[in-house]
């Protein structure tokens, strides 16, 4: 195991220059597995601060998440983090998953409540012997071992929160429970993120809030991202990208320009780094990391094949 793979996310992001990080989802089949590992190998040489692996809706990917994070921890130099949700799990089952992660050498966990299976915006019903909110999961993980724990943050508020102040109170509640950092839901304009950061600072908390950014490589990501995340689709961006509708290459170029500008603004505002939702591909993230100068080593990566 190398220094990075044995590190905590907090250690990896406590650096004096902006970092980047990448989120993957666990592959469903052999083809997805090959695609994921092409992306991992191509991104590994850029030295991301950490890479995270999501937990399927309804706990559906439990074994695949644990397996993928375990392989990243053992076969790469990367610092890895497993997502974990409380959906459909009793507290006993959650303890068991946390134990499997510890046994696999995972030191970092993103603690999430998760969404109701079937309808992400539906009514949340906790498992009868389970947990109700992410703050309880943070506390359970912290009690279970020396894990570094991250949580979700919502620049425009979680869709079920009464208002932004209540939402901020829930986020700082997760910090109080022991979370060391937060990663945001994706968003397309910086203002919501900056206001969230101000509210959290005003509440007296200084944990890093890492902006989560999805590269706008297609019309689908532009429209689906906000629809699934609850973040607004800014009218000015809709107008700016409308001329490229129907032309995939032109839309990608314009969308990547928009994403690059958003990241530049965030970095100018002093964000600690950027967490890319890369959809198990490497090319768009690599382009943005190059544009933004976020690769700490600048090592040669010319020999590796692109993954999209
Ligand atoms: C970076 C990131 C990664 C994600 N990864 C995954 C993943 O891998 N798998 C997956 O299934 N989903 C994932 N999600 C989605 C996430 O599970 C959903 O957005 C879910 O609806 C909320 O999760 P949470 O951890 O923020 O929940 P919570 O913090 O529990 O908040 C959920 C709602 O309950 C309210 N609330 C919170 N605490 C309390 C309390 N103590 N008392 C009363 N109300 C409270 C909040 O205001 C909010 O409205 C991710 C989201 C983000 C931003």
Image (spheres, helix red, strand yellow):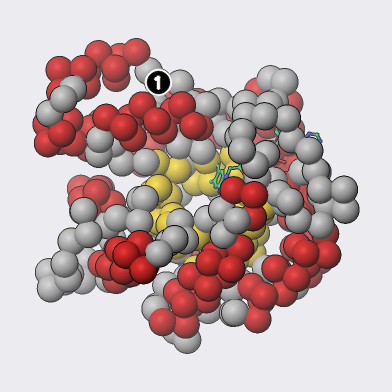
Residue at (44, 28) in percent of width and height:
226
Task: State the residue in front, 6 or 241.
Answer: 241
Residue at (53, 66) in percent of width and height:
64
Q: Residue 248, image x and y in percent?
A: 15, 34
Q: Tell me which image quadrant ligand 1 sits in.
A: top right
Residue at (39, 41) in percent of width and height:
213
Q: In this view, does 65 lie above or below 243?
A: below
Task: State the residue in front, 152 or 86.
Answer: 86
Q: Is residue 196 above or below residue 214?
A: above
From the viewer's perspective, tell me whether residue 4 is left or right of residue 301.
Answer: right
Q: Give the image quarter of residue 246.
A: top left
Q: Most extreme residue toward the bottom, as rendered?
A: 1
From the viewer's perspective, tell me whether residue 267 is left or right of residue 179.
Answer: left
Local packing at callout 1 (Cα closer than 10 Å; few below 14, some 14-19, many 20+) is some
Q: Residue 192, image x and y in percent?
A: 50, 25
Q: Give the image quarter of residue 223.
A: top left
Q: Residue 244, image x and y in percent?
A: 15, 23
Q: Most extreme residue toward the right, as rendered?
A: 129
Q: Is residue 36 above or below residue 55?
A: below
Q: Residue 41, image x and y in percent?
A: 29, 71
From the viewer's perspective, tell me whether residue 118 is left or right of residue 210.
Answer: right
- Residue 194 in view of the camera: no
Query: To which residue does mark 1 refer?
Result: 233
- Residue 305 in view of the camera: yes
Q: In this view, does 99 lie above or below 237?
A: below
């Amino acid at each position: 195991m190398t220094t990075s793979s044995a590190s905590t996310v907090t250690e990896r992001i406590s650096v004096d220059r902006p970092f980047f990080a990448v989120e993957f989802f666990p592959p469903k089949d052999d083809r997805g597995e090959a695609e994921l590992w092409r992306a991992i190998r191509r991104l590994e040489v850029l030295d991301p601060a950490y890479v995270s692996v999501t937990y399927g809706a309804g706990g559906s990917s439990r074994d695949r998440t644990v397996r993928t994070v375990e392989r990243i921890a053992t076969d790469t130099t990367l610092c890895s983090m497993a997502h974990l949700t409380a959906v459909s799990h009793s507290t006993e089952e959650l303890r068991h998953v946390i134990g499997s992660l510890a046994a696999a050498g995972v030191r970092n966990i993103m603690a999430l409540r998760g969404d109701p299976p079937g309808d992400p915006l539906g009514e949340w019903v906790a498992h009868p012997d389970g947990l109700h909110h992410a703050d309880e999961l943070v506390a359970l993980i912290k009690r279970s071992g020396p894990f570094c724990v991250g949580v979700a943050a919502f620049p425009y508020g979680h869709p079920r929160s009464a208002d932004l102040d209540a939402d901020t109170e829930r986020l700082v509640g997760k910090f109080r429970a022991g979370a060391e950092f937060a990663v945001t839901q994706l968003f397309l304009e910086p203002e919501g993120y900056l206001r969230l950061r101000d509210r959290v600072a005003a509440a007296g908390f200084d944990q890093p809030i890492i902006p989560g950014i999805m590269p706008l490589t297609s019309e689908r990501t532009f429209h689906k991202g906000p629809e699934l995340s609850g973040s607004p689709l800014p009218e000015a961006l809709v107008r700016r990208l409308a001329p490229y509708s129907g032309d995939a290459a032109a839309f990608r170029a314009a969308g990547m320009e928009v994403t690059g500008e958003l990241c530049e603004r965030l970095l100018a505002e002093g964000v600690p780094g950027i967490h890319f939702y890369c959809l198990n591909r490497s090319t768009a993230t690599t382009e943005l990391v190059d544009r933004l100068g976020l690769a700490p080593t600048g090592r040669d990566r010319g020999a590796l094949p692109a993954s999209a």
